[in-house]
Image: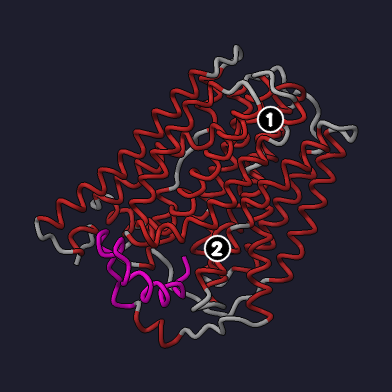
């Protein structure tokens, strides 16, 4: 990712207990950037860029997070001849591409392609939604291509650059502004499901409902593109071969990657199936439409409070607590049979899961020896697909206890990898191992 982020990280992370314990080491080429990079820390262009980034997150992952509405509609009406596991591939591939395309968008951003990434990514998102509105019942492959592949690739082009560009404009306010920008995702996760449920399941219908949603998203993306500006700072390119070689020898990185992958297999289960699960358990259909909104409202609160909690508990400690708690909440989902259980479990899982999601980048940051490798490490660590597994376990008979139990256990196994990280760090500190050796950095 972009090198200008290093300046404030040098100040904040060097004082962090997690930074010390995970062995955060900066490369020698980091310090000159602090003297060359002088962000204005405010102003019309700066706040306009932050607002544009917020809208990008609102329309990007905020829209992907509403796929549970589509999963419900497709399973019951539009793609009723296909099993839930097949339908869930649409949302899963969109989520996968939105994250892993950062392997492309990161280096292109570093080379000064920010505006082109925003324009092309926004066009792909807009075109994908308008194309989806022309899909007919039973046309799974058209929905898969436009809503899964095309939209996922477009969101992937805009996701990371729209966050990183904010660091060019803010220094002392950077943490606060970055939090505001990323809060666009949970806010979008609340607004889009409400709108889509009323459009798709009301009198408007699928075709006109999706077009209305596409028009709404397209206008916001246009405003975002017109609002964001760069300051012309370009960082050197990252050699992924070198980063992969380093990561293969970094025990803590391997544990973190395995833990994140396993946990996030279970992470998408409530997100994709919460609404369908509520309806199938006999809960009022009108209330079930708002089940995702309840989850995402708690998600928004979790995103805003995770940074404060991490300052007292530490990033890794809070990640362990949140993932273990999430695993404990996923399994009782099978017992939901009334409105109160939906509200309680939705709020609990929404808050706890978003605390972990808010900690993913900080956890990766404090464990990265060279900040110029951060983008590559994020791309390597985030390579996962979770949705289809839950759908396959659910089956056409809707045996809810099987995916609930599986996702709860696999999430718990993932959280155990973070516990292993903590134990290794503690053992190495007891044995007097230096921070550079803890991080797996090579001289």
| Left or right: 336 in relation to 192 | left
Confirm or deny contact between disc 2 and disc 1 (CB under 8 A): no
Q: Quadrant of residue 339?
A: top right
In the picture, the quarter occupied by the C terminus is bottom left
Question: Is any part of residue 239 visible from this angle?
Answer: no
> Tag 2's secondary structure?
helix
How far apart in space, not on screen, are marks 2 and 1 (Cα)?
Answer: 37 Å
Q: Is residue 22 magenta?
A: yes
**As drawn, is 66 to the left or to the right of 309?**
right
Kindly give the residue lying farthest to the top in the view shown.
397
Would you say 292 lies left or right of 286 here? left
What's the magenta region?
A: 1-29
User: Is 339 a magenta residue?
Assistant: no
* Residue toward you, 333 or 1: 333
Q: Residue 55: x percent and y percent?
A: 69, 60
Neighbor class of circle 1 (other Cα within 10 Å; few <14, some 14-19, many 20+) is: few
Residue 179 — which label? 2
Relative to the observer, which residue lies in front, 191 or 378? 191
Location of residue 351 in the rendering, given as x and y in whole percent from the top left corner = 53, 45
Please tell me which of labels 2 and 1 falls first in the chain. Answer: 1
Which mark, by number, is residue 141? Answer: 1
């Amino acid at each position: 990712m972009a090198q200008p982020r290093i300046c404030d990280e040098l100040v904040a992370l060097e004082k962090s207990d997690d930074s010390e314990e995970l062995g955060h080491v900066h490369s020698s080429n980091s310090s000159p950037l602090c003297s060359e990079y002088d962000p204005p820390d405010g102003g019309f262009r700066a706040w306009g860029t932050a607002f544009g980034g917020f809208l990008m997150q609102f329309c990007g992952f905020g829209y992907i997070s509403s796929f549970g509405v589509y999963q419900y509609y497709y399973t019951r009406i539009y793609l009723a001849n296909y099993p839930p596991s097949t339908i869930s591939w649409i949302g899963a591939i969109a989520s996968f591409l939105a994250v892993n395309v950062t392997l492309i968008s990161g280096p292109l951003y570093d080379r000064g392609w920010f505006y082109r990434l925003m324009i092309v990514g926004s066009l792909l998102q807009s075109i994908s939604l308008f194309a989806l509105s022309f899909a007919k019942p039973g046309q799974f492959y058209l929905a898969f291509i436009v809503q899964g592949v095309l939209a996922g690739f477009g969101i992937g082009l805009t996701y990371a650059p729209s966050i990183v560009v904010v660091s060019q404009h803010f220094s002392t306010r950077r943490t606060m502004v970055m939090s505001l920008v990323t809060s666009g995702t949970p806010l979008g996760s609340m607004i889009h499901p409400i709108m889509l449920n009323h459009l798709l399941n009301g009198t408007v219908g699928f075709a006109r409902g999706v077009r209305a949603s596409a028009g709404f998203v397209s206008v916001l993306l246009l405003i975002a593109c017109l609002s964001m500006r760069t300051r012309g700072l370009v960082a050197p390119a990252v050699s992924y071969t070198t980063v992969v070689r380093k990561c293969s020898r970094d025990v803590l990185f391997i544990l973190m990657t395995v833990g994140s992958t396993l946990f996030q297999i279970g992470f998408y289960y409530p997100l994709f199936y919460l609404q369908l699960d509520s309806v199938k358990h006999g809960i009022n259909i009108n209330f079930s439409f708002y089940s995702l909104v309840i989850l995402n409202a708690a998600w928004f609160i979790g995103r805003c409070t995770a940074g404060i909690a991490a300052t007292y508990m530490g990033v890794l400690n809070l990640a362990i607590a949140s993932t273990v708690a999430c695993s404990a909440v996923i399994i009782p989902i099978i017992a939901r049979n009334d409105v109160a259980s939906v509200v309680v479990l939705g709020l609990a899982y929404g808050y706890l899961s978003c605390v972990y999601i808010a900690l993913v980048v900080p956890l990766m940051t404090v464990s990265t020896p060279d900040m110029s490798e951060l983008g590559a490490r994020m791309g390597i660590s985030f390579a996962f697909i979770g949705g289809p597994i839950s759908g396959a376990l659910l089956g056409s008979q809707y045996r809810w206890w099987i995916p609930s139990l599986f996702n709860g256990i696999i999430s718990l196994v993932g959280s155990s990898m973070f516990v292993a990280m903590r134990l290794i760090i503690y053992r190495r500190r007891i044995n007097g191992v230096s921070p550079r050796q803890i991080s797996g950095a090579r001289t």
